[in-house]
């Protein structure tokens, strides 16, 4: 027990605090699930960490928006600082992306734009928050990343963790302080230790959107210093060079978000949200019920495991259960087909020094590799045709041998292994290795390069097939059969 809160289970730990699932007990048997955040005991006497902890609660409590995790109470009991926050029964966006990758799927442009537009709505509310006198607080999150975006199992999207948020009323930040956060999602000016404003959060959202579309990490490197250098001086490919079906309008919005100069980006998260919904009108029609159905499709096992770890009783249990699907709601298989696309994973055999290069050079894009593959296939076809002609001359009296020669021109498709995870950076704020939420980079393309037709002579006496060809097996994801 911690005052009026009964701790039920441990949820996660960070560099500054641990988060527990708890229930708040009230009169007449009232209970309510909350996320209880407790500062680490060894940091409880460190003034800097206590200031950050208190600032986070103070800022978050002032933000009133459905897309931001609300802080309900800040307190200290027996020397322990704690925050009582809204409990979101769901997963981080990083976990959702990993589940999609495991299922061999990627977000449609509509789903990606919807998620980022919802995050933008929450950030805009935070950026516009004022004090009691109505003066803008100038809040900047500074740690926008897939780990700090929560997607509830009811399909709602929320921003969390304002632990290193910056506000104008605070004391000036040093360069060391300004580099707190996840390096791979920092704006260039943030990584360079310069002053940041709301446009740095817009840039971080651009990185998230790029990764949702491509299903690949934008910035990777073998160590932090190299990663920091690439973030400070970014070279970024358009998403459409990696995934050809990216709409041109959305492509343009992503690159505008990722502009090196803050003046060239959308000047607010509100403006960004309007640009996204105008670029992808279908994103307006993605409902929370659709997202909930998709989570049931790709995270059914995780949802069941998490529910089994929540031994709450009474009214709290009802709040934590997955809502039953209604007839008018999307079914998981429908959501999987409508909100995701197949992801084609291509192995890379490049050495580490090349594989972790900047985004513009570390691997050939499909646009550059397709002509090369086509040329190789054409050369192989020509060689095969010449061999067949030689065989025809040498064995003109043996149709059986001709048939065998022609049969050698086809081969079964090879298995394509998944690329090995590339090392990711550390969190400079916590000096700890990245959590399991961090997703390994993979190579994604819209479709494989087409194979050229091979001209062959028909078999003179090809017998008709005695049985129809068997129906190809369809991959199953979460028990759902998918035939593209």
Image (tube, grey):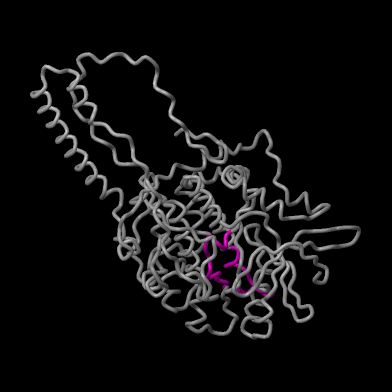
| Residue 418 falls inside the magenta stretch | no
Residue at the spot 70% in from the left edge and 67% down from the top edge: 71
SS majority, magenta: loop
Q: Nearer the viewer, residue 177 or 110?
A: 177
* Quarter of the image that includes the N terminus: bottom right
Q: Nearer the viewer, residue 403 or 349?
A: 403
| Residue 135 falls inside the magenta stretch | yes
Q: Nearer the viewer, residue 201 or 29?
A: 29
Left of 353 or right of it: where is 61? right
Left of 27 or right of it: where is 145? left
| The image quarter in which residue 358 lies | bottom left
Label tally: 0
Q: Is residue 237 above or below residue 327?
A: below
| The image quarter in which residue 387 lies | top left
Residue 275 pos. (x, y %): 47, 54
Left of 351 or right of it: where is 16? right
**Magenta span:** 125-149
């Amino acid at each position: 027990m911690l005052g009026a809160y009964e701790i039920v289970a441990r949820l996660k730990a960070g560099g500054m605090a641990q988060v527990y699932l708890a229930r708040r007990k009230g009169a007449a048997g009232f209970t309510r699930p909350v996320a209880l955040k407790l500062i680490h005991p060894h940091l409880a006497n460190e003034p800097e960490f206590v200031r950050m902890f208190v600032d986070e609660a103070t800022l978050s409590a002032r933000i009133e928006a459905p897309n931001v995790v609300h802080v309900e109470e800040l307190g200290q009991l027996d020397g322990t600082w704690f925050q009582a926050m809204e409990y979101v029964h769901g997963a981080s966006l990083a976990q959702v992306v990993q589940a999609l990758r495991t299922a061999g799927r990627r977000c449609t442009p509509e789903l990606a734009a919807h998620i980022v537009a919802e995050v933008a709505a929450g950030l805009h509310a935070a950026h516009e928050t004022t004090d009691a006198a109505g003066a803008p607080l100038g809040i900047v999150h500074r740690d926008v990343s897939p780990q700090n975006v929560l997607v509830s199992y009811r399909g709602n999207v929320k921003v969390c963790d304002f632990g290193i948020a910056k506000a104008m009323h605070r004391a000036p930040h040093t360069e060391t302080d300004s580099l707190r956060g996840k390096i791979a999602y920092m704006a260039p000016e943030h990584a360079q230790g310069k002053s940041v404003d709301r446009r740095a959060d817009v840039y971080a959202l651009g990185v998230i959107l790029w990764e949702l579309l491509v299903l690949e990490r934008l910035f990777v490197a073998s160590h932090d210093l190299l990663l920091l250098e690439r973030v400070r001086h970014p070279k970024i490919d358009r998403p459409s060079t990696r995934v050809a079906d990216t709409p041109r309008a959305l492509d343009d919005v992503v690159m505008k978000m990722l502009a090196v100069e803050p003046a060239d980006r959308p000047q607010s998260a509100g403006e960004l949200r309007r640009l996204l919904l105008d670029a992808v009108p279908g994103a307006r029609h993605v409902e929370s019920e659709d997202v909930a159905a998709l989570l049931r499709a790709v995270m059914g096992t995780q949802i069941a495991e998490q529910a089994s770890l929540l031994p709450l009783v009474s009214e709290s249990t009802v709040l934590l259960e997955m809502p039953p699907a209604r007839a008018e709601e999307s079914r998981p298989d429908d959501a999987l087909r409508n909100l995701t696309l197949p992801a084609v994973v291509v192995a890379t055999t490049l050495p580490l020094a090349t594989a972790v290069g900047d985004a513009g050079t570390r691997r050939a894009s499909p646009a550059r590799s397709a002509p090369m593959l086509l040329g190789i296939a054409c050369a192989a076809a020509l060689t095969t045709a010449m061999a067949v002609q030689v065989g025809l001359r040498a064995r003109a009296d043996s149709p059986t041998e001709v048939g065998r020669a022609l049969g050698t021109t086809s081969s079964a498709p090879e298995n394509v292994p998944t690329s090995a995870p590339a090392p990711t950076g550390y969190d400079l704020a916590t000096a700890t290795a990245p959590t399991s939420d961090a997703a390994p980079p993979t190579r994604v393309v819209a479709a494989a390069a087409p194979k050229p037709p091979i001209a062959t002579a028909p078999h003179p006496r090809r017998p008709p097939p005695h049985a129809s060809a068997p129906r190809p097996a369809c991959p199953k994801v979460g028990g759902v059969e998918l035939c593209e």
